[in-house]
Image (cartoon, helix red, strand yellow):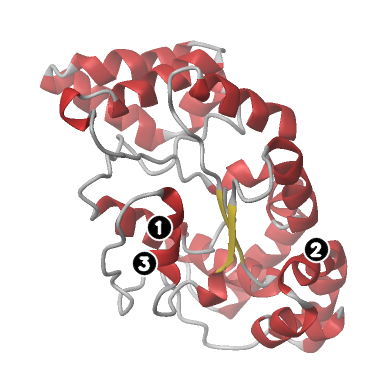
Amino acid sequence: MGTQKAGTTWMYRYFCQHTSMRPGEVKEYHVLHRGFSTSFKKNNALKRAIYRRKAEGTNRYARRLWGMRLGRRMSDYIDYFDALLSRPEDDNHTVFTADMTPGNITLWPEKLQQLSDQMAGRGIIVKPVMMLRDPVERLHSAARMFVRRSGKTGRDAELAQLQFNFNSGDNFGHGRYDVALANLSIAFPEGAAHVGLYEELFRPGAPEAIMSWIGVPPEPPPLDTRVNASVRTYDLDEALQREIALRYAPSYHAAAARFGTERIAQLWPSARFIL
C-alpha cells in the first residue's frame, strides 16, 4: 500500500526470490485505486502482459487479465489472483502473491474491507504492507525519478517536477499518512497490517521480519542492492523543505504517534520543522 518511492520495487523483487511467491504479470496493477475501466487505458505494463499471454497462447491468465480490464467488479480482480494461488502443488503450504501499487495508499476503508471480505470468501488472506518515508525526501526522490524517465537532466528540471508533484492533488494524497493509517485501522483489526519505515527497510532483519509476518520462512535479502535509486546531488533549500513539511504536518504527527517522536525525528530530517 505504498507509498511511492518507499522501496516497493526492491521489496517486490525480494519477494519474487522466495520459493513460495507466485508473481503475477506485473508488480503494479493500478486497478483498485483507479477503477477497472481506467486502469487499462493508463497501465501499459498490464496491456503488454495481456498481449504477451495471448501471443503465447497461455490464456488461463490472459482471460482473467482481460476480464480485469473490461469489468467494473472487484470479482474480476479477485479471479485473477485466485488463479495465481490455486495450484494443486500448493495445497499443503502457504503461498503468496502481491499487487504492489503505491497508489493503493489512497484506498478508502470501504474498498479495503470489500477486498478483504471477498478475498476471504476464496480462502485468501489479505495482508496489507505500508512503508512510510520522510515526505520531503519522498517528493524529492519522485521528482528525480520522473525527470530521469523523461530524459531530462539538471536541477532546474527536477525542481520544476518537484513543484508540479507538490501541487498535484494525486501526489499529495500519496503523502497523507495520517489518512492512510486511519483508513487502515478502520478496515483491518490491530496487528493485521504491517506498517514500517523506508529508512529502516535495508537494515539487517527488517525485510525478514516482513516475510515472517506474511507467514513464510524468511530468506536472505539483497541488502546491498538498490532498485530505481536516484542519486541526490544537492539539498533542497530550507524554505522549500519547510513549505513541504508544513503541508504534510498531519503525516508527521501520525508517524510520530505510531513510531514515537524521537524515532521519527532521528530518521526524518524534515521532521525538525514539525515535531
Residue wearing tag 2: 254
Residue 210 at x, y = what percent? 45, 59
Residue located beneath label 3 in the image: 227
Q: Is residue 10 left or right of residue 33?
A: left
Quadrant where the image shows the C terminus: bottom right
Question: Which of pointers 3 and 2 lies earlier in the amino acid sequence?
Answer: 3
Residue at image location 37% in from the left, 53% down from the top? 12
Kindly identify the amino acid type of the residue bearing the numbered disc 3. Answer: Val
Indicate which label's residue lies in the foreground, 1 or 3.
Answer: 1
Q: Which residue type does callout 2 highlight?
A: Ala
Q: Are marks 3 and 2 in contact (CB under 8 Å)?
A: no
Label 3 and label 2: CA atoms lie apart by 28 Å
Q: Which mark is residue 131?
A: none
Relative to 214, say whether 218 is above or below.
Answer: below
Residue drawn where x is 52% and y is 87% of the image: 233
Q: Which residue is mark 1?
A: 212
Name the kind of residue labelled 1 in the image.
Ser
Q: Is residue 231 left or right of residue 15?
A: right
Secondary structure at badge 3 equals loop
